[in-house]
Amino acid sequence: MKKLFIYTLLILAGISSFLSCSKEDKVTLEKENLDYFAIINKPKEKWNALDSLCDTIYRDYGVKIVYEYTPQVIRPNDFYYPPTYDKALAYTRKVMKTLWLEPLKKNFPDYFKRETPIEFILMGGYYHGHPTNTDIAAGAGFNGQFYRLGMGGVNNLDLSNKAAVHDHVVTLWHEHAHNQDVKYGRGEIFDRISIGTYYKEAWNTKTEPQAVTDGFFRKYGGFAPEEDFATTVEHLTRFPKNDALTLINSNEKLKRKYNLVNKFYLDKGMDLHKLQSIVYDLVYKK
């Protein structure tokens, strides 16, 4: 009886080992076939100027710039495509290095270490719900993943147009605000300020002055609490402090949202007013 029990254990162990190996082999096979940003690992001797720049950025800032991939579907019906080489090279030099990473690391080192996404995706067009969608506002970035950020419109951005560049960088910080929101949560207190008054899908029927009266920095902020949070950050990174506060002090709801968002960032080492001033000077005065 004892021998039979031992034999039974050995047989079960063998079956378990076989199933375990089979399962492991299956997982390995799936990983090998997984198309995750189909980036070619080029030998260094075949690098172009952008590859070298991306390598430098990775070593200096710890951020992987992804510009070379096949058109992707991230979730069902989410579509985007890579930028052209020349546009990606100029964009990486100007926006990624000079206007985003360099001033961030220099002026807000603690925030930089903790809150900078480790991956940035350059998109030639915009992030769309369908390959034939041409709406330029259809998803500027990857706003739901705190380790990754991305921006659309690289092929369309005129880097000689200072106003367009400034608007693009402000949009970047709007998208990064979604990053922060997902990572930490904006908090129930923020959501309660405008509870029951969000426009939802009707946001585009409103005017900007009406939105301010209703307690939103932009009418798009009236779409939902997450956009309310991001457009608050956008307002603070777009306008000089005195101008921003003038609008904020005109409305009690805006004032409450500002106090919460400003503290949210200050607690993490980021002064949004100082960021606005630094980036504005880099865009317009250099």
Image: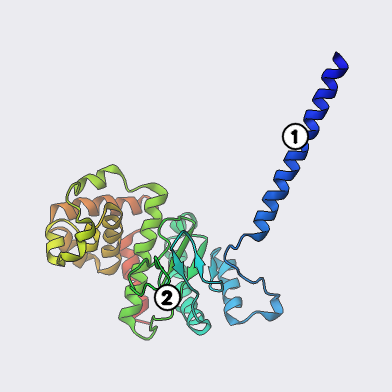
State the colouring used for the structure image. Answer: rainbow
Identify whether 13 is placed above or below 67.
above
Instruction: Provide the residue designation for mark 2.
Output: 125
Residue 105 spot, x, y in % from top left: 47, 64
Identify whether 244 is placed above or below 81.
above
Is 145 left, or right, of 6 in this rendering? left
The quadrant where residue 180 appears: bottom left
Q: Decide which of 260, 218 is in the foreground and name it.
A: 218
Is the C terminus in the top left, top right, bottom left or bottom right quadrant?
A: bottom left
Residue 137 spot, x, y in % from top left: 32, 70
User: Which label sits in the foreground, 2 or 1?
Assistant: 1
Instruction: Provide the residue designation for mark 1.
Output: 16
Q: Residue at the spot x=22%, y=44% of the render?
A: 192
Q: At label 1, which amino acid type do we have?
A: Ser
Q: Decide which of 236, 47 is in the foreground and name it.
A: 47
Residue 277 spot, x, y in % from top left: 31, 69
Residue 268 spot, x, y in % from top left: 39, 52
Most distant residue in the top direction: 1
Q: At label 2, which amino acid type do we have?
A: Gly
Q: Nearer the N terminus, badge 2 or badge 1? A: 1
Q: Residue at the spot x=44%, y=56% of the render?
A: 111
Q: Decide which of 206, 122 is in the foreground and name it.
A: 206
Identify the element where label 1 is drawn: helix
Is 17 left, or right, of 238 in this rendering? right
Pointer 2: residues within 10 angstroms few (<14), some, or many (20+)? many
Pointer 1: residues within 10 angstroms few (<14), some, or many (20+)? few
Identify the element where label 2 is drawn: loop
- Residues tagged 2 and 1 counted as in contact (Cβ below 8 A): no
The quadrant where residue 3 appears: top right
